Structure formats: structure tokens, C-alpha cells
Image (spheres, rainbow, N blue to C red):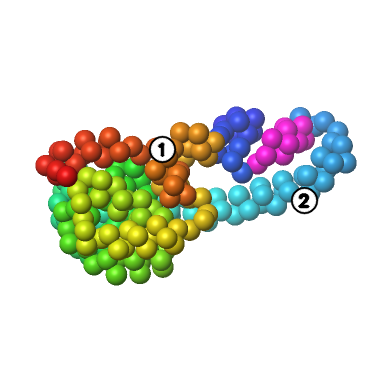
Amino acid sequence: MNPNQVLNEESVKKILGKVEIATIKKKILGKTLKQRERNYLYRSIRPKLAAANLLSEACLLQAINKHAKQDSSLIEYNLSLYGYQMLLLKKKHARKIPVEDLIINILNHPSARFIEAIPILLIKNKIDKYYLLDLACKFGVKNKLGYLIETANILKELPYLYDLLDYLKASKDEEISYLVEGDADFLMNTSPGRIRKWNLLGRFFDEDFRKLALTYDIKK
């Protein structure tokens, strides 16, 4: 892939700004840079490219992807143990972990197909709410947990979790975060209101959760 193609990739645009990209293209073409552009090149662009080169040499992306696959295997195996069946191409084996750890593991490595499982887990399993709260505070996922406990209660009343839900509502983190990573502008405009009340962004809809609950014969 030639430099111009690389610079047009969306992943590159998340690291380099429009002015930086334009400056690099101008430099590659051998055009004379203005003083401001030379400053960009020296102060901003070269350090970023040097850091990117170091990250590439360290093969961090490969290491992260490998770890993500291990996390997915652990999550998928434990979901099946706790009553949430997924269509797997092959049988997976991993260690069993407490359901509370499974929920936090999902929230720390979020994907849509795992996030939607959490309300079902909360309904089908008896949760140690104090341990779950401790983990949520430790890993900074209180808002996510609150939203999903609220979702579970929409599907089926869970009175023993009311006090935990009330606490999470009263102690919400103010910082906006993502249920699942995505385009910020798009999610700001399309995230449902109930998600936004938890200072979250994500395209999860109550009707989809209700349809999923019906497949597990969960009724209000």
C-alpha cells in the first residue's frame, strides 16, 4: 500500500488530523513547506510516526488480538455454563469463573453479542450483588452495569436487585462512555434515550432485548 493510500485509511485519520495528513502529503511530493507546516512536522507528526513505528515493531496489535481471542473463548464457554447458549463452530473449553466476574469481563471487553447476554444472565442466575458492585466500582463500569440491571428489570422484575439499581442511579459517573465502541458523532445522534440517561452511548434497543428474552421463555 502506497503512502497516499495509507493516509486515506480511516484508522489513520483517527490518529492524524486533517492538517497533519495534508502536511505529510505535501512533504512526500517534495513541495516547500511553510513555517507553520514545518512546525507541525517537527512537533507533532514526526513524534506520532516514530511512536507508531515503535508500536508496530513491538507487534502490540497482534498481542492484543490474541488476548481478545482468549477473552472471547473464556466468555463464550462461561455463557453456556450460566444458561446463555451461543452458536459455536466448535466446542470450547476454558475455566469456570463466577457469574459476577463473567459480567464484568464482558463489560471490560465489550462486544454487542456479549453485552446483550448480560440481562439474561442477571435473570437466570442468582447474583452476589455486593461482590458485583465491588467489581463494577473497581473497573469503572457502574453506569454500564446500572443500565443492564435496569434492562433486566424491564424484562422481569428482580426485587432483590432494586437497592443496587437505586444506588447505581444515584451514583452515576458523569463521564460519557461507550457500551460498545463506535463512531462518536453517529452514536451521539442515534443512541436511545434510556442509554443516554446512564451517560452511555450505544445502539441497543429495548425491543431487541424483549425479543431475546422470549427465546429464553422469560416473561415479566
Q: Main secondary structure of the magenta part?
A: helix
Mark with earlier residue (1, 2):
2
Q: Are marks 1 and 2 in contact (CB under 8 Å)?
A: no
Q: Is residue 48 above or below residue 132?
A: above
Location of residue 158 in the rendering, given as x and y in whole percent from the top left corner: 21, 55
- Residues shaded magenta: 16-28
Location of residue 7 in the rendering, given as x and y in whole percent from the top left corner: 63, 34
Residue holding disc 1: 192
In the image, residue 20 lies in the stretch drawn in magenta: yes
- Res 106 quadrant in image: bottom left
Q: Quadrant of the N terminus?
A: top right
The image quarter containing residue 88 is top left
Left or right: 109 in relation to 17? left
- Residue type, numbered disc 2: Arg
Q: Is residue 31 above or below residue 116?
A: above
Q: Which mark is residue 183?
A: none
Q: Residue furthest left?
A: 217
**In-front residue for pair 98/60:** 98
Quadrant housing the C terminus: top left
Query: Is residue 139 positioned above or below 65 on the image?
Result: below
Q: Is residue 184 above or below residue 50?
A: above
Q: Residue at x 88, y 41 (%)?
A: 35
Q: Where is residue 172 drawn, in percent x and y?
A: 45, 58
Q: Can residue 76 be seen from the camera position used here?
A: no
Q: Residue at x 44, y 62 (%)?
A: 171
Total marks in image: 2
Q: Position of residue 63 (x, y in %)?
A: 43, 55
Label number found at residue 43: 2
